[in-house]
Image: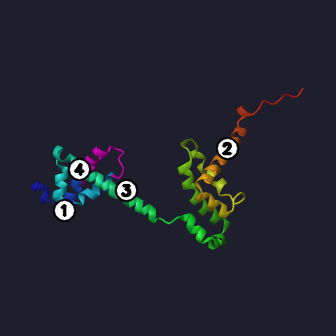
Amino acid sequence: MKEFLKKPKDKQREELGEVVYYKIQKILGPKGTNIPQITGMLIDLDVFEVADILKFSEKEDLLREKVKEAQEILENDSDEEKQNKPDPSKQIKENLENFLKKPKEEQENELFDLVYPKLMEKLPEKDKAQGKKITKMLTAFSTHSVQAILDLVDNDEKFSNEIQQALAILNDSSSDDDPDTKPPKKEAK
């Protein structure tokens, strides 16, 4: 420990980071989330406290406790970030007059960017490859007004129904293209 404390602070931090990262990964598993952030949070603690955390078996509970605290802090920060994030649908509605003055292509792109992430959250895994096609269907001005698209985004039930309808259309059109699903042609006599 004396040798460790003689090292420059940045070297201490680097060495602690490597050890703490490994121990956190061991606790959370290789696919654990936020391991780098938690490592950074722990090594920013007072050096003596971190040294205590690193002691093996008798202090493993302390490390688990600190990891849990760090995870809670990160989750709370994430929740606050989500709450403070502006609602794009609301922003467009509040500035609808200005939005409608934009070129149609720009409007379509903004609406696509609004609809696509929400759609991808709702689509079953097997249908995710159709996400862009469905989004284009839902944001097409030929079938929906800007206001209708915004209302759709804000109404989960309507949004889900539109997704199902779009999937049905895509599935029907793909079966029309499939020669195995077409009835055999009658030969002319």
Query: Which contiguous range is marked in magenta?
Result: 17-34
Q: Which mark is residue 168?
A: 2
Foreground label between 1 and 3:
3
Pointer 1 with pointer 2, Cβ within 8 A = no
- Spot occupied by residue 173 in the image (x, y as percentages of width and height): 71, 43
Taking the image as shown, residue 80 lies to the left or right of residue 114, namely: left
Q: Taking 96 as reference, is 52 above or below it?
A: above
For marks 3 and 4, the one nearer the N-term is 4
Q: Taking 20 as reference, is 109 above or below it?
A: below
Taking the image as shown, residue 144 lies to the left or right of residue 54, namely: right
| Residue at which label 4 appears | 63
| Residue at which label 1 appears | 9
For marks 2 and 4, the one nearer the N-term is 4
Picture quarter with the C terminus: top right
Question: Which secondary structure, mark 2?
Answer: helix
> Residue type at mark 4?
Leu
Foreground label between 1 and 2:
2
Foreground label between 4 and 1:
4
Whether 158 is among the magenta residues is: no
